[in-house]
Image: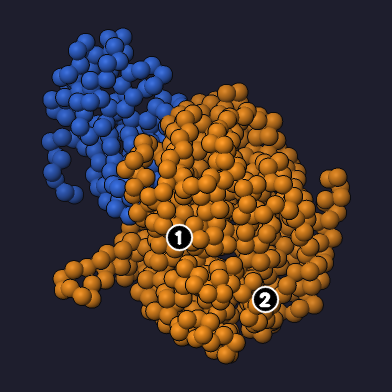
Chain colours: A blue, B orange
Amino acid sequence: MRLTVLETEKCVGCQSCMFACSRRVGEAGLARSCIGVRSIGGMERGFSVIVCRACSDPPCAKVCPTGALIPREEGGGVRVLPDKCIGCGHCREACIIGAVYWNDETNKPMICLHCGYCVDFCPYGVLGMQKREVENVEE
Amino acid sequence: MLKNDSLENILYINLTRRTFKVERRPDLFGKYLGGTGVATQLLHDECPEGCDPLGPDNPIIFAVGVLTALFPLASKTVSMFKSPLTGNLGESHCGGRSAVAIRMAGYGAIVIQGASTMPVYLSIEGNQVHFRDASTLWGMGNFSSGRIIRENEPGSGLRTIMRIGKGGEKLITYSCVTTETFRHFGRLGLGAVFGSKKLKAIVVSGKSSLPISDKKVYRTLYDEVYKAAVESPVMKKYHDLGTAENILPLNKFGGLPTRNLTAASFEHASKLSGEAFAREYLGRRLACSHCPVGCIHIAALREPYEDVSYFYKTSMISYDYEPIYALGTMLGITNPEDFLKLMDRVEEAWGIDAMSLGVILAWATEAFQRGMITTEETRGVKLKWGDVKAYIKAGGYIIDQPNDFYKALARGVEYAASIYGGMDFALSFGGNEMPGYHTGPGAYIGYLIGARHSHLDNAGYSFDQKILVEKKVEPEAVVDALIVEERWRQILSSLVICFFARGIYSPELVTRLLAVAGFDLSEGDLQRIGREIHTEKYRFKVREGFDLNVMRLPERIFETPSPVGGLDREYLTKALAYAQKIIQKELDAAE
C-alpha cells in the first residue's frame, strides 16, 4: 500500500496532514513533516500536495552515494538508513517534485514512509492508501 | 509555559532605524497566554498616550497563542494598534496562514515600531529579518503584490504574506491588511497604519517543533479536538455554506439591515443567500492553516470582455455574511454578480474594510436622495440603491480623494456626517461602522460596550435571538450577560482560537489542552485572567478618552423596528450608564 494524492482539487489547504505527519513521531509543529501543501501560485488556483509518490525506481535512491536510501520492496518508497547518510543532499535535488524533506537538526533527509497516518486527518478525501495494481480503477 | 517554548520570543522591528531584536518574555506569555492578553500589555508599553494613529509612534503588534500549531483552530493572529478610524483601541483578528507562520518562525509576538521614509516590505524567515525595497510594489493591488512577493521570497506553503492595497497607502482610516489573498485584518484601519509607515507587506515563514509535556496525552487530546472540529454540528454551518448561511435566517427574523437600515429585511435576500452563491458561483473552498473546517468560500465570476469576443475574465472573489450585508443589502443590490463585482474591487484593488465602506456608501446614498449632497460633491455620481456602477465609481473616488467630499468619506461615516449632516442615519457605534445585525437592544449594547465595538466582542445579536425574543430582560441584566461573555472571549482570543470554534472550546477542554502546553490553570483561573484582560483593554480605552456616557446612538436604529420590537433610547442609555459604572469599578479595583 502506498499513500496517494487522490484528488488535489478537493484540497482546501488546511494542512492538517502536515501536522499529523509530525505528530506521528510524537512531535508538535511542522519540523518533522514529510508532506507539504502549498498553493499553486495563489490560493485562488488551489493547492498541490507534495509527498513521496513511491516511484518504482526511485531517483533519490539512485543518486545516493552511500546506499543510505533503500527502495522498499512492498508498495514502493524508500527507507532512510541514518547511519549511512552523510547529508550530502543529492537525494533532495534528484526528487523533482520536492518530496525529500530535510531535518535541519540531523542534516538528513525525511521521506514519507507511506504509513497512512495523515489519511485519517484529511477530511476532504484528498489522500488515500492505494494498491499499485488498481490505481487506475475509478470506484 | 514549558521551557524552551519559542512563544516567549518577541520580535521587535524598528522601521526608522532598520534594526531588529528579540526579547524573551516568559513572564508575559505565562500570565496572559498570548494573543489579545499579551498584545494589550505590549500596546500599553509601546503606544504613547495621545499619539497620532498615523504617526511613527503608533506601534503595530501581532500576537499568537500557546495553542497555535498545537491544536486545530487556534490559528488567528491578533493585531493591536491605535485605530485611525476611532482614535482608540484598535484590535483586529485574521486567520489565513498568519498565526501558524508566526509561531513556526519562532515568535509569540511581533512589534513594529517607527516608520520608513520609502516603501518597504519585511521578510521574516525564522531568525532573519530583511528590509526590502517595496517601491515597485507601491500602488499595486492585493493580488499583484502578493504574486510578486511569492515569487521573490522563500517559504512556499509555510508562510503568510500580509499586504495592503491602495486604501492603506492612501491612509483611508478603514483600510485593511490582507493575508493569503482572501483573509483580512479587516476592521479599524490597520491598513492605514501600515501605509503611514510606508510598510507595504510582511512575509513570515518558518518550520519548527514545539515542546509538549506528554506525547501520548497530546495525541489523544488532539484526536478529541479534531473529531469535534470535523463532526460537531456547531461547526457544520461554517463548513457547508460558510457564514453566508446567515442571510436567510437573519432576513426571516427581520434583523438584516437593508438600504441604510430603512428596513430590516430585504425582498431580494434569496438572490444574495449563501444557498444562491453556492449554487451559482462557488468555485473553491479554502481553509486557514490548521483548521479542517474550511469556511472560506470563493466565488468564480466569469465575465466577457466587452470589446473583444470569446475572451473572458474569471475572477475569484471571497464572500461572507458581513460583506454581503454591507455591500449587498445595505446598498439595495439585487443582483449577486453586482455584489461580486463591487467586492472584487474592495478586496483586490482597494484593500479597505467592506463593512465600513458599505455603511458609508449607504449613508451617502441617503444623503444624496435627501439633497444634502449633490452631484457637485459626488463629482457627477448619482448614488442610487442597487446601482453598482455608481458605487464602483464612488469607491474609486474614495481611494483617489479628488475633493473634500471624498476625503471626508475616506475618514468614516461619522466624520462625513459631522460635515455634511445626516448624523441621525450615520450608522456607526464607537466610531466603527455597524455590522449586519439589527436584531434588538442586545446587538446595540454589544457594539457600544464591546472593546472593539464589534459584534464578535460579546455576541449581543445572539442574546437578542436566543433570549430577548422570548422575554423581556432588564438592561442591567443584558449588560451583565454580555460582559461575562466578553471576558470569556478574551481567553479565546488570547489563545487565538477562532470564535467560530467557541462551541467546541469549552473552559473545561481549554484547561486540559493548556496542561499539555505546561500551563496549570483551572477554569476559575481562566475566568480571572479573562476578566483582567478585559479591564486592561478598557484601561487603554479610558486613557485615550473613552466614555460610554457620551456614546452616540443614531436615531435610525429607533425608527426601524427590530425583531424584538422597537428599540427604546432610554433602555439603551440605562444599559450604557450601568456598563460604565461596572467598568469603572473594575478599573478602580485594579489600581
Q: CA distance from mark 2 to mark 1?
A: 25 Å
B355 vs B456, nearest the viewer:
B355
Residue B43 in sight in this render = yes
The residue drawn where x is 23% and y is 20% is A90
User: In the displayed structure, would residue B472 be above or below residue A93?
Assistant: below
Residue A114 horizontal/vertical position (percent): 28, 30
Chain ID, mark 2: B
Classify mark 2: helix, strand or loop.
helix
Q: Earlier in the sequence, mark 2 or mark 1?
A: 1
| Image quadrant where residue B296 sits | bottom left
Pointer 1 local density, CA inside 10 Å: few below 14, some 14–19, many at least 20: many
Q: Which mark is residue B95?
A: none
Which is more toward the observer, B111 or B327?
A: B111
Depicted B19 relative to depicted B347: above or below: above
In this view of the protein, can residue B460 be seen by the observer? Answer: no
What's the residue type where badge 1 is placed?
Lys
Dots 2 and 1 on the same chain: yes
Instruction: State the residue in front, B584 or B286.
Output: B584
Residue B385 pos. (x, y %): 47, 84
| Percent coordinates x, y for residue A135 in the rendering | 15, 40
Indicate which disc residue B418 carries.
2
x and y, in percent, of residue B525 in the image: 73, 39
Q: Chain letter of disc 1?
A: B
Name the amino acid, label 2.
Ser
Q: Residue at x 39, y 56 (%)?
A: B140
Quarter assignment of residue A108: top left
Numbered mark located on residue B166 in the image: 1
Please, what secondary structure does the residue beneath circle 1 have?
helix
